Image (cartoon, rainbow, N blue to C red):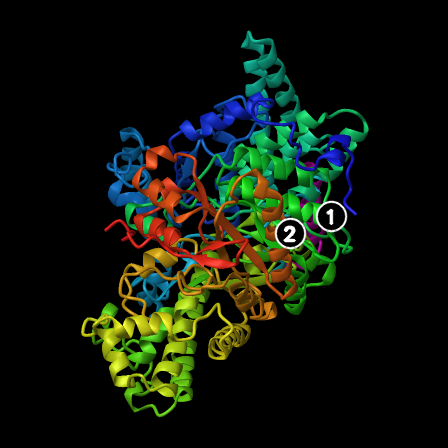
Amino acid sequence: MATIIFKEIQKDVSLSDYTLDSLLLLKELREQHFQTKTEICIERAKYVTEYMKESEDKHEPMELRRAKAIQHYLANRNILFHDNNLIAASTTSKLIGAPLYPETIGLTIWPELYTISTRKAKPQILTREEADELNFNIFPYWLDRTILEVTRKEQNPSSLNLMEKIAFFLAGKSTVISHTTPYFEPVLNQGLNTLINKAKEHEEALKKQDIDRETEGKIIFYQAMQIAMQGILEYSRRLSEKLAELAKNESSPEKKQNFQIMSEICARVPANPATTYREAINSLWTCEVAILAENVNMAMNPGRLDQVLYPFFKHDVENKMLTLEEALTLTGCLWFKVADNTNPVPETSEKLFGGAGSVPAVTLGGVDKAGKDAVNDLTYIMLKITELLSIKDPNVNARYHYKVNDKKYRDRVCEVIINTRAIPALYNDVSNIATLENQGVATEHARDYAVIGCVELGSAGREFSSSSSILFNLSAVMDLTLFNGKRPFITGDQQIGPETGNPEDFQSFNEFWEAFKTQLRWLAQQAIDLNEAFAITHQKLYPTPLLSCFFDGPMEKGKDLIFGGARYNSSGATHLAFSDVCDSLNAIEYAVFKEKKLTMKEMIEAVRTDFAEHNGELLSYLKNTVPKFGTEDPIAVRNSKNLVKLLYDFYQEHTNYRGGKYRPAFWSMTNHAGIGKISGALPSGRRAYEVFSSGITPASQRTPELTPAFIAVAELDSKYIPGGVALNMKYTPEAGSEERKTYLKKFGDMIEGYFKHGGMQVQFNIQTYETLIDARNHPDNYPELIVRVSGYSAYFKDLSDAMQDELIRRTQYNLLTGKAVRLPESYNGGE
């Protein structure tokens, strides 16, 4: 049973007596959040570049140069307090800032430095002075030193050409080395001083040995760890000094007291063990901010916060040092801190990643390492804060173990989803734990998994996952198979993949399937080869000594994470257009080879010409008669399972540069919209330029029944999808308070049934077509409308036209009848 201390939570897990009007600081911070425009912050880029230039001729090992560069930045940051938040550290020098990482993704905004503030699509503020600093002093240094350019210069893999065409695959490592979950318990329980001393002890012990090349490398690594952690202490010390100064000059008694308290906290933690809930939150957040100084702020996840912070919370409550209102306020302050940063996005990338934040995932509930109910007071407090604030970050996710967790918890999660209309997402502990165990993760570690970024799975603090290594376009494989290794719509008559035969000569669907398998293996191999090439550059130029301090393994092994220092190592490959390709396979098997509705030659020509020569009858047949993924049709079931198994078998055959396996996944951020808009037609009846289906979700407007759609995804067998899935479902909102109880029960029961069939994850938009259409036409009327995209949340107004269109077109189901609601015939996608 769940551990509950507060009597108020025992009586009412929804904490209905608490509102934003009763939590005035959170109300103030929320209003400020929605009124604040994103600003690009050049501070990190400035100080890191400054140090790297100065140390160019010192010939120090790169581990030490990187550690000192991060220390230099942390020790010289401009200490600012933008609001009345009770937590001290901040990610950038802006209230909501987009920090620049010129060694990876930062240079992509170079062409629009002087227009990014005024562009129509999601402007990001950058002053003329800052733009000049980037243009003349910072970016030129990194021009030939980025991950991408160094890899091109030193290795020039042929697969790089495919990635740069965008429509085949993307390699995440060219822009980030994030997508993982650190381990904060040692810092909270022991303090950084203890960790620094441990690294020092390891260093001194090694110096007493015969020093070969390997030993020397370990000594350097331990030195780098110490330097990097000292940078955190310097930053915390300066926070404390600045707060003390502010307290001295503050006339408001309330603000003076808050400054004094924060100053005292920063003087104690994270240098020393945390002793209170507020100290623990500040310590954890200061370390998270420091990690983002070294690593791109993309999916660097705080983890299972209701577990990590619970001992300190419990101590305070039992000693009557913390009220429920104070706990809610502190937790809400942390939510706003997590949301204080986003990414700089060039205008050309808006179609691929528009609307996304930095996607830091918080994971709640589920079971603990012993397999017991992990739900506690903090779980319900964090659910309440998620409900009250309804902001896009952190990306809140709720684990549910239907054999262990109470249905009261399940129903509360469902209630929060219904009230926010979008968050949190739900994860099936039974399937996900078994899936990680199948990957060789020890049971107690698998039980302690945290969601990474969008939907990926990883044991918190033990697994360096790099789960966004590959973003793979499955429709490219379909094209290569149809056109014998070519993609006429994308690359004309150029031979891209192997020649697997002219499909017009194939006599059976099995021949087509064998050709498809060959093309998939070839293209996926190109993606893996490029990931491995980028890895060599990372190991040479961009080690991560600071991030390594917050994982189980590097301290013991004397090995950086990017060299395999973590206990578990994996690389993730996610796939776009899964449903569209499944439905295309169905169309070829059913329409061409079974029913012989048309020949293979006719199908290929129809796809090549975007069905231009057909009067609509063929399109109607392909869209409405051919078997679809998301139904119980045997052809659709078999082809979807075969595709999942094919991908699993291929990736698991490969070992990455850190000694771990590649894990296939099915989530898509907004890539399915952007890449769909540059892609040609498919045999499924999908027209050219139409967006692809999201994640692992059945294609929009193709599955008339809710239950079969859930079952089709659930029965794919989670052990073959170790990277995770994003299943996006859309429901008609409940019709008034009288229907609420029935609606809530149906909502929870449907999820439980899906999980019992093996489903891994599901997320929802509780919206009608009409509301989303109106929000598209009148964005100023919906400034806070939050939606689930494909693994993360976004404000609808910030999404590209293509992504808004995809969200509108997603099948809307009436939960109580289980039937699909028809898309309004008048909707034309805004054209």
Q: Is residue 193 magenta?
A: yes
Q: Secondary structure at mark 1?
A: loop
State whether the magenta stretch is mostly helix, strand or loop.
helix
Label 1 packing within 10 angstroms: few (<14), some (14-19), many (20+): many
Q: In the rendered view, would you say 696 is above or below 771?
A: below
Residue at point 44%, 63% (across, down): 470
The amino acid pointed to by label 2 is: Arg
What residue do we see at 33% from left, 87% from top?
596
Place of residue 243 in the rendered image (x, y in percent of width and height, measured from the top left)? 57, 19
Asked if the magenta segment contains residue 15, the reply would be: no
C-alpha span from label 2 to label 1: 10 Å
Q: Is residue 80 left or right of residue 683?
A: right
Residue holding disc 1: 374
* Amino acid type assigned to the residue bearing label 1 in the image: Ala
Residue at x-position 59% and y-position 34%: 385
User: Does residue 824 appear in this view?
Assistant: yes
Region rendered in magenta: 189-211
Marker disc for residue 399: 2
* Residue at left offset 29%, top offset 85%: 600
